[in-house]
Image (tube, helix red, strand yellow):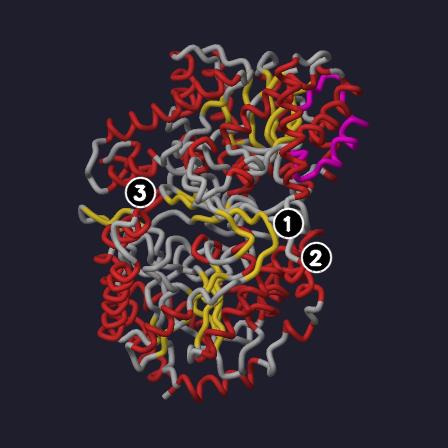
């Protein structure tokens, strides 16, 4: 029996990669210094796994920005617009330009599209495909990192995105061809990579193929068989691992077990029931990797439960054909629970129920020892400790609150309905709000400068008292309100300077949540988030945002939006308790947000935004499971939003989502205004709303905030023309794609001034057309 890890967090236990990348982008460190940080992180990760006793240690699971973008660069699938950068700049600078855009030295080049990695909060850079596209080995990262591992004495297991998964993640950028046609053009580059790895002594190769756990058409299934048959033909002695995760194989089971590979990895956290089905049909030559440790959550593994699955497999095929692993890459887990040493932040009682990436590595090795015929005494002690911790969590009085459970039980369908339909609400809202055509707003947050973050840090350390901190935030809020008034934005926001993160901020004020000091997880690039942990029943002890919303509204005669994070997003972007259905936890959060919405309305806030950027992300990966999820997710949003009067305007925001398949459900949410990401896709996402004849109002983002480049007024006008071509002007709002928290003020000011000018220009053009 062997152990392996599918991938390890690459940001560093203290976010060293984030800090180094941002320093490099701002010119504060050299390329060599950046590369050294990456090398140190990789070596530390390898050493940690080696010392823990992992048999197959991964390499090429490290990335400076995104593993899909790494593969794009490896294959030379570089869009034409980056040709000049490719000629003038280093490979690393080209790579970052593809991820972030490039706007200097006389060049102005947009970034590649970004979207969510399956149903996680990790974002990847979307490959761009064209008919007859050519591919070649451009970046040698995979080979170089394997050789780096060999230099420190580790014959690592290269982790490579499977060819089919890479293609299926990409986007056809012209009509008239199917991206699957490119498989035979890409395959020779994969073959070249494998030949070099084999020459250098690689024994195992891991191909990540999560699409094998998704709905596949017949052409994709056929291509899977052709590709792996050719790889096996070329490399009869390489040990090929195909890793599936995030779902069960279901109708792809016969395809997966028939592939000519050595090891098939199963996610037995998401789909434990698939093991029995696989064991019925597994060929004698195929080994199984059992993903029994949750790679996407922070709860301690229940050893007894995992051992039952391991024994089920070993009884059928023998221990020598078994590998033990986490369910997926540990990219989605924080680095090290040992760094959580502040009892006032994370109590020892709750901490004993948890395991981060480093601890999951140890759990993997311990399970191998426990699955042996005669575990030693020290290993049996670990089992006893594990049993004690699991039982403690089940019986702890911290988890259960009868009042919360009772309130959920008496919630009715009427609690999830507005009083009147949108067509009537719109009249009431316009009578009070009196907004112009193409009203401008932002999504909520404004730049959190070093000064703002420094104030928060000083406040937490006790170097500023509550009044001093409050006064500083009030000055920053007033400055932001005045600036928005000055440039002519129609609906203002207070800037959210009091908030750390859009989920963490609410979790800190809701009961049933707990936090970590260093539980950072990569979201995209250098962007890291520290998800709250939902460990128990959720309720709102006190108002959370009313103070700052009231203060901001008192400064201006314009309308200021109340800003909230929605229940589904709070659920999705937290580490969620796994002892009850997610739908039940979500309804508890929805009732807490409903209380906040009602209090904001009572305080005179007439526009309230309930952000739900994660509602599309939460979709199950199999379409047959969608309707159940969408039913409870939409209900949760409506519960949170439906306690207000008709004249109170409810906004929601969603980003990086494909809406075509769920547009009816988006409409069922019944938000008065929805703002969406549209600039990177050049308004393509609006087509779904147009085809559906979406009845409510829409703010298609005209400014990509995930890139430092500043779009011009004319560029935004062109986007608004595209929007107006498919959506009636009376339904359109003008806004950025997302919140501005991570941007700098100079970029923000230029971009928003251009946005307001673009809105006015669009209004003039519309007036001329209608006249």
Q: Are marks 1 and 2 in contact (CB under 8 Å)?
A: yes
Q: Which mark is residue 620?
A: 1
Residue 472 in view in this figure: yes
Chain part drawn in magenta: 266-288
Q: Quadrant of residue 251?
A: top right
Q: Position of residue 628 (x, y in %)?
A: 70, 57
Residue 56 placement, left or right of 504: right
Q: Quadrant of residue 484?
A: bottom left
Secondary structure category for the residue under label 1: loop
Residue 214 placement, left or right of 474: right
Q: Nearer the viewer, mark 2 or mark 3?
A: 2
Q: CA distance from mark 1 to mark 2?
A: 9 Å
- Residue 269 lies in the magenta stretch: yes
On the image, numbered disc 2 is attached to which residue?
Answer: 628
Q: Residues within 10 Å of mark 3 (few under 14, many from 20)?
A: many
Q: Are marks 1 and 3 in contact (CB under 8 Å)?
A: no
**Measured along the vertical axis of the image, is residue 155 above or below residue 87?**
above
Secondary structure category for the residue under label 2: helix
Q: Position of residue 474 (x, y in %)?
A: 27, 66
Tell which of 755 and 393 is nearer to you.
393
On the image, numbered disc 3 is attached to which residue?
Answer: 97
Quadrant containing the C terminus is bottom left
- Residue 664 lies in the magenta stretch: no
**Measured along the vertical axis of the image, is residue 234 above or below residue 104?**
above
């Amino acid at each position: 029996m062997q152990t392996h890890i599918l991938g390890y967090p690459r940001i560093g236990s203290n976010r060293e990669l984030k800090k180094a990348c941002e320093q490099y982008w701002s010119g504060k460190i050299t390329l060599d210094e950046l590369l050294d940080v990456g090398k140190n992180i990789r070596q530390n990760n390898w050493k940690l796994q080696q010392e823990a006793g992992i048999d197959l240690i991964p390499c090429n699971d490290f990335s400076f920005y995104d593993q899909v973008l790494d593969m794009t660069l490896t294959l030379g699938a570089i869009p034409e617009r980056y040709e000049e950068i490719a000629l003038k700049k280093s490979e690393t600078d080209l790579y970052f330009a593809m991820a972030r855009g490039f706007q200097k030295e006389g060049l102005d080049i947009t970034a590649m599209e970004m979207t969510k990695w399956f149903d996680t909060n990790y974002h990847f850079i979307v490959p761009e495909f064209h008919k007859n596209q050519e591919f070649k080995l451009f970046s040698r990262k995979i080979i170089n990192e394997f050789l780096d591992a060999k230099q420190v004495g580790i014959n690592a297991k290269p982790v490579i995105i499977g060819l089919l998964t890479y293609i299926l993640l990409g986007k056809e950028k012209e009509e008239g061809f199917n991206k699957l046609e490119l498989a035979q053009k890409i395959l020779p580059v994969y073959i070249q990579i494998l030949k070099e790895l084999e020459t250098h002594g690689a024994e195992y190769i891991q191909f990540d193929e999560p699409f094998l756990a998704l709905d596949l058409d017949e052409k994709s299934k056929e291509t899977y068989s052709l590709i792996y048959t050719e790889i096996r033909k070329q490399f009869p002695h390489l040990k090929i691992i195909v890793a599936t995760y995030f779902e069960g194989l279901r109708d792809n089971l016969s395809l997966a077990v028939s592939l000519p590979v050595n090891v098939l990895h199963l996610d037995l956290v998401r789909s434990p029931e698939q093991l029995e089905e696989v064991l019925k049909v597994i060929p004698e030559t195929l080994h199984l990797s059992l993903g029994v440790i949750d790679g996407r959550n922070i709860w301690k593994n229940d050893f007894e439960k995992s051992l039952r699955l391991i024994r089920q497999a070993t009884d059928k095929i023998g221990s020598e054909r078994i590998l033990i692993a986490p369910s997926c890459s540990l990219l989605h887990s924080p680095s090290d629970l040992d760094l959580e040493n502040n009892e006032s932040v994370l109590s020892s009682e709750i901490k004993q129920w948890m395991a981060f990436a480093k601890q999951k590595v140890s759990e993997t090795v311990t399970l191998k020892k426990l699955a042996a015929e005669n575990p030693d005494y020290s290993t049996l002690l670990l089992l006893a400790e594990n049993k004690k911790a699991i039982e403690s969590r089940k019986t702890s009085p911290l988890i259960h609150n009868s009042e919360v459970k009772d309130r959920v039980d008496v919630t009715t369908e009427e609690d999830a309905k507005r009083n009147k339909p949108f067509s009537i609400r719109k009249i009431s809202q316009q009578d009070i709000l009196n907004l112009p055509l193409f009203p401008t707003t932002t999504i909520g947050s404004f730049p959190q400068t070093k000064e703002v973050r420094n104030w928060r840090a000083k406040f937490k350390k006790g170097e500023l008292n509550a009044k001093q901190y409050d006064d500083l935030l009030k000055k920053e809020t007033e400055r932001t309100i005045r600036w928005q008034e000055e440039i002519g934005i129609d609906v203002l926001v207070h800037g959210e300077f009091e908030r750390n993160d859009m989920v963490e901020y609410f979790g800190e004020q809701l009961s049933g949540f707990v936090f970590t000091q260093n539980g950072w997880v990569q979201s995209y690039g250098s962007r890291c988030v520290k998800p709250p942990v939902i460990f128990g029943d959720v309720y709102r002890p006190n108002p959370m945002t009313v103070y700052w919303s009231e203060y901001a509204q008192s400064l201006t005669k314009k309308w200021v939006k109340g800003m909230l994070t929605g229940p589904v997003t709070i659920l999705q972007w937290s580490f969620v308790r796994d002892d009850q259905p997610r739908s039940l936890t979500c309804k508890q959060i929805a009732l807490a947000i409903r209380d906040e919405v009602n209090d904001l309305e009572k305080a005179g806030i007439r526009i309230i935004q309930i952000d739900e950027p994660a509602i599309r992300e939460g979709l199950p990966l199999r379409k047959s499971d969608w309707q159940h999820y969408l039913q409870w997710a939409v209900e949760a949003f409506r519960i949170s939003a439906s306690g207000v009067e008709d004249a109170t305007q409810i906004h929601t925001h969603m980003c990086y989502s494909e809406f075509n398949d769920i547009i009816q459900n988006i409409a069922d949410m019944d938000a008065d205004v929805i703002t969406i990401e549209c600039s990177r896709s050049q308004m393509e996402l609006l087509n779904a709303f147009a085809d559906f004849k979406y009845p409510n109002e829409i703010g298609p983002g005209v400014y990509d905030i995930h890139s430092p480049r500043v779009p011009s007024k004319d560029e935004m006008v062109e986007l608004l023309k595209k929007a107006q071509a498919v959506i009636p002007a009376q339904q359109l709002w003008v806004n950025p794609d997302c919140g501005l928290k991570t941007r700098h003020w100079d970029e923000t000011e230029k971009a928003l001034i251009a946005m307001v000018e673009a809105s006015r220009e669009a209004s003039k053009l519309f007036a001329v057309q209608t006249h």
